[in-house]
Image (cartoon, rainbow, N blue to C red):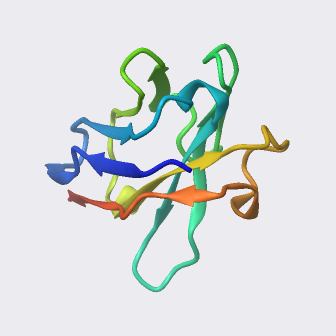
């Protein structure tokens, strides 16, 4: 089992940047595919980005491709989401998630077994 804790959310102006972090407990972090999802007010939770166990392969939603970068540091049990050129439509609660089965495609929400509590990102226009 793994516990996930997100941090780094906040209020930023359009065009700005934020970096989210997700710290995982336990010694088996490198065995999990990791993903970031987000949920805007009144909307479904949607896929943002995912990264393979080794970090060698990534996936992105079309809406964030070229602006967001997912990375991981297995030595620190942490996954990151660097968000640049933020837009008001990026406003949401951002969640990190862990998949123990290395399922594919990685953008499927139900593939993920463990979820963090979320961190709020608000982008003002």
Q: Is residue 122 left or right of residue 94?
A: left
Q: Is residue 102 left or right of residue 35?
A: right
Could you tell me residue 88's position as x and y percent? 32, 59
Which quarter shows the C terminus?
bottom left
Residue beneath the point at 68% across and 27% down: 52
Is 27 rendered above or below residue 22?
A: above
Image coords of residue 110 (percent x, y): 74, 64
31 with respect to 122 (left or right): right
Picture layout, residue 11 above or below residue 83 = below
Q: Residue at 66%, 29% (x, y): give it.
A: 31
Going by the picture, which residue comes out furthest to the right? Answer: 104
Q: Residue 108: image x %, image y %? A: 76, 56
Q: Position of residue 100 (x, y in %)?
A: 70, 43
Q: Quadrant of residue 20?
A: top left
Task: Residue at 35% x, 38% y: name it.
Answer: 23
Number of numbered discs overlaid on the protein picture: 0
The residue drawn where x is 42% and y is 58% is 116
Q: Which residue occupies the foreground of this view, 96 or 9?
A: 96
Q: Is residue 107 above or below residue 42?
A: above
Q: Quick one: 32 or 39, which is closer to the camera?
A: 32
């Amino acid at each position: 089992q793994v516990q996930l804790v997100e941090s780094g959310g906040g209020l930023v102006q359009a065009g700005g940047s934020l970096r989210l972090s997700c710290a995982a407990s336990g010694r088996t972090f490198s065995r999990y595919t990791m993903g970031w999802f987000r949920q805007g007010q009144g909307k479904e939770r949607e896929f943002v980005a995912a990264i393979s166990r080794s970090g060698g392969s990534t996936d992105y939603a079309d809406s964030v491709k070229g602006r967001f970068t997912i990375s991981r540091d297995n030595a620190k049990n942490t996954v990151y989401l660097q968000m640049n050129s933020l837009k008001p439509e990026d406003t949401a609660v951002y969640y990190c998630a862990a998949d123990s089965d290395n399922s594919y495609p990685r953008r499927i929400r139900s593939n993920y077994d463990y979820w963090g509590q979320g961190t709020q990102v608000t982008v003002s226009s």
